[in-house]
Amino acid sequence: MAPPASKQRSGSNKKAQLGLFAGYLAAGLSAVLGILLLAISLWRPETFQGLRSMASDAAAPVGDVSAAGRVGTQSFFESIAGYYEAGSKNAELEQEIEIARVRLAEARALEQENERLKAVLGLAEGDIEPVAISRLIGSTNSSTRRFAYLSAGRDDGVERGMPVTSPMGLVGRVLEAGSNTSRVLLLTDTDSVVPVRRATDNVVAFAEGRADGSLRIRLINLGINPLEEGDIFVTSGAGGMFHPGTAVAMVSEVTDDGAIGQILGNPAATDVVTVQPIWQGDIIEAMEEPLESGQPVE
């Protein structure tokens, strides 16, 4: 037979009251113990030093793990930041290198321009006083003939037959002279023939234009060909038109009767040229004048 409901309710109420009382008692004792421990720690702090040390030692592994994770996280983000910072610095360095290359190219161009101006100044101050210093203002590109045009003419003292030179050597001779411009027959034209000799000795030859940018060096004395690649040929002065000793060509290929040479005074790489007086021009004029009847011939 089941116990009465009133007895069951009174038993549960007692248990609840005892549990509540035990909770209050435990809370009260904990509060008193806490106050007591707090008073002891304030009065004598060294009392709990051992306990604090034991607690620190017990928590040390957990702290090490936490610190290692924190350091690893910082290192990871620092690596990412360093990567982007390094990329930005590399881009800046590449830009600075490009700017430095441009500045270097400008400096080299300025140096070359200074050398060119010094060479022009050397031409103007040479032993031969030039008739005019001018610029090449044009040339024939598609024609089989090889002509160039000067920005100087009769008004500047330029006359037909005068040699035209650059800092590197002979360019050609004046073919026609206008008032302000002149036409120049280049060395590479097929109608151009210049007496030359090898610069190191007296091996004489004729430099004939080939209309392809090169010269045919035809030896006068046939026999064993003494020419070698790299030989320099200069004007010999024969014929009285070109001053002797002016650079003409360098041997690039040896042939049976001479060689093929590349011109040194390349008009394509020449800006400023000088027009020189004809060498022994008075003698040439005297030779071209017909002898008068009754004039004694010596």
Image (spheres, helix red, strand yellow):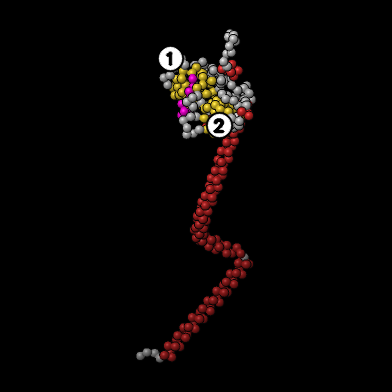
Q: Which of 67 and 176 is in front in this view?
A: 176
User: In the displayed structure, would residue 90 be above or below residue 165?
Assistant: below
Which of the image's four quarters has the N terminus?
Answer: bottom left
* Mark closest to the chain's N terminus, 1 or 2: 2
Estimate how packed mark 1 is, as few (under 14), some (14 to 19) or many (20 or more) residues with alpha carbons within 10 Å. Answer: few
Q: How crowded is mark 2: few (under 14 residues within 10 Å), some or many (20 or more)?
A: many
Extreme left residue here?
1
The label on residue 241 is none
Q: Against 81, is 166 above or below? A: above
Identify the residue shown where x is 60% and y is 23%. 277
Mark 1 = which residue? 223
Left or right: residue 134 versus residue 253 is: right
The type of residue carrying mark 1 is Gly
Q: Is mark 1 on a helix, strand or loop?
A: loop
Camera-near label (1 vs 2) is 2
The amino acid at mark 2 is Tyr
Q: Give the range drawn in magenta.
A: 206-213
| Residue under label 2 | 149
